[in-house]
Amino acid sequence: MANKRISDIRITPDNQTVLKQLGLLQDLAGTWKGKGFNLIARPNFHDKTDLYLQLNQTRETLKFDPIGSSIPNRGFGQDDIELFGLTYLQQISDAAFDGALHIEPGIWVRQPSTAFPPETAPAQGQLVARMGTIPHGNSLLAEGVAEPFTGPPVLTVPGSQYNFSLFPSFNSTPFAVPPTAPGIVFNAAGSSEKLTAPTVPATPFPQYDVTVPVGAIPAGPFNPPFTLNTRTPFDTTPPEPPLPPNIDGVPMQDVINDPILLLQKRVEQLVADGYKFEGTALNIATTTPLSFLKNANSGAAGPAVPVTVPQFGGGIENIQFLNGESPVVAGKTELQENAETAVVYATFWIEKVTHKTNGHTFMQLQYAQMVVLNFPIFHLLNQAPPAYVNLGWPHISVATLRKSFS
């Protein structure tokens, strides 16, 4: 944190200097292509059901371009600092029909340690941030740390559910988010909505259970009187996107519970084929700390562990449509969202993959991202008297990409 005054004269450095200043972000530069999986629980007003569970096998192109100069931030409480970064464009399509699913322009930056306010990266690590803009009407600032690693990423190892990730779970089971709660508690890895449901009143949601076919279903001991099981169907023909009973040998029910298993399957295969790994892990979040249940299927009353991400700001903005409005329900004013994005956390593994025998090397990028959407349970609002229950609905994206020639 040496004192420094950044000159007012802006001189463009050479490309190698720019890449060096990117630090642990430099290997992102280039174009990455591959495939992944998208799970999103979204509102379903049209069918009058609590949610539609959308599942997509995906194709993705993710392009990073280094910003060709430093980015000066002028200081009042301390001397100026310089940021260095890359712009990116993420494009994701449905693998079945190549239809558009997601496009996101944004920027990754590296920030030096600061004295005002005091922010210091862990040893060997660097402070990083991602700024993204999503056409649904959201923008995010997720911050955290980049740290080098050696060894197989993603896999479960002693002391870590996903090697080199700070986050112990990317589980898809929905969870209660009272508007007055100081924080939210994410379900433990390996939880299933079906097994967690008995600990949470007014559920389960059969959309998460592949044994329940799409269409009309009867009420059960815990089931409210749903009329439809609204979910992407399996083994269908157009116009619905078909989904297989398994992906790369991972049963679809397991994929729905924990999509990150698809990343683990890829790494397991490479390890079996004789490859070794080194690289950089990027752990970022829009807020900190985050709390995770320790035990699968324990429900919100189970023991939890906090996870703190190095943080020097962060947050999410939503357009008013997503934020919803605040009607009076049973004599009480309640916030009812259409689909407010509340939290984002993610791990990106930048991987140099090398064969132990023949030296064959390639660059692989894997990521797991959790986006929490808040919206209420529909059927409870229609009962007499109406009841308001706001839930956090996981939207999880995973992908395995390789750096391509272009």
Image (cartoon, helix red, strand yellow):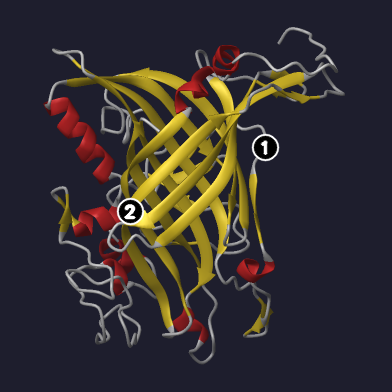
- Residue 358 seen in render: yes
Q: Residue furthest bottom?
A: 384
Side of 352 relative to 331 (left or right): left
Q: Looking at the rendered structure, which numbered label has been put on residue 284?
A: none
Instruction: Answer with mark 1 or mark 2, whichever residue precedes in sequence.
Output: 2
**Residue type marked 2:** Thr
Q: Residue furthest front?
A: 406
The residue identified by callout 1 is 313
Q: Is residue 352 above or below residue 204?
A: above
**Residue toward you, 79 or 350:** 350
Q: Quadrant of residue 322?
A: bottom right
> What is the C-alpha distance between the residues marked 1 and 2?
31 Å
- Residue 191 seen in render: no
Residue shown at 39% from the left, 43% from the top: 368
Sort mark 2 into few (<14), some (14-19) or many (20+) by Cα contacts within 10 Å.
Answer: many
Q: Secondary structure at mark 2?
A: strand
**Residue toward you, 292 or 314:** 314
Side of 169 relative to 381 (left or right): left
Residue shown at 65% from the left, 19% from the top: 112
The residue identified by callout 2 is 58
Q: Is residue 115 above or below residue 197?
A: above
**Residue type marked 1:** Gly
Q: Is residue 137 above or below residue 330?
A: above
Side of 73 relative to 374 (left or right): right
Position of the N terminus by quadrant: top right
Q: Secondary structure at mark 1?
A: loop
What percent of the width, then of the height, locates residue 405?
36, 30
**Residue toward you, 189 or 265:** 265
